[in-house]
Image: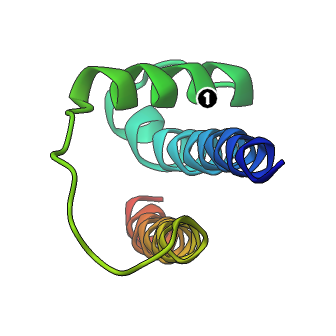
């Protein structure tokens, strides 16, 4: 039963990260790339697909690290890290958007 919970948590986190990454990519693209290069705007679904594709291309396997953290703690750390990074990228993108427009 614990394995099912772990699999569910990992799948749910991947879906949440894809949605968050897609949202950030869509906003940054539409705020910065569209005005500068006069390209088409990205839809939310296109941004999610592009985000997943780029994540797949740049993904690399990491060797198993020996540490005392359980999988729950690792998942929380990754989730908080992703939220903080997305927020920082959105903040700087919004500031750049204000300077461009």
Q: Relative to 88, is 90 above or below?
A: above
Q: Is residue 25 left or right of residue 100?
A: right
Residue nearest the viewer, comparing 28 with 24: 24
Q: Relative to 49, is 55 above or below?
A: below
Residue 73: x and y, percent?
A: 54, 77
SS at badge 1: helix
Give the residue drawn at x 48%, y 70%. Answer: 74
> In the rendered image, which residue does mark 1 sit on?
48
Residue 45: x and y, percent?
A: 71, 22
Q: Is residue 27 left or right of residue 36?
A: right
Give the residue drawn at x 54%, y 18%. Answer: 40
Residue 22: x and y, percent?
A: 60, 39
Residue nearest the viewer, comparing 82 with 66: 66
Give the residue drawn at x 19%, y 44%. Answer: 62
Give the residue drawn at x 62%, y 19%. Answer: 46
Residue nearest the viewer, comparing 73 with 17: 73
């Amino acid at each position: 039963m614990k394995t099912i919970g772990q699999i569910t948590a990992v799948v749910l986190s991947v879906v949440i990260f894809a949605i968050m990454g897609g949202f950030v990519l869509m906003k940054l693209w539409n705020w910065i790339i569209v005005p500068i290069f006069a390209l088409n705007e990205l839809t939310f679904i296109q941004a999610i697909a592009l985000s997943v594709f780029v994540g797949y291309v740049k993904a690399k396997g990491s060797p198993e690290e020996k540490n005392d953290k359980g999988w729950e703690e690792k998942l929380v750390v990754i989730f908080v890290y992703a939220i903080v990074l997305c927020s920082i990228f959105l903040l700087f993108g919004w500031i750049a958007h204000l300077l461009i427009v």
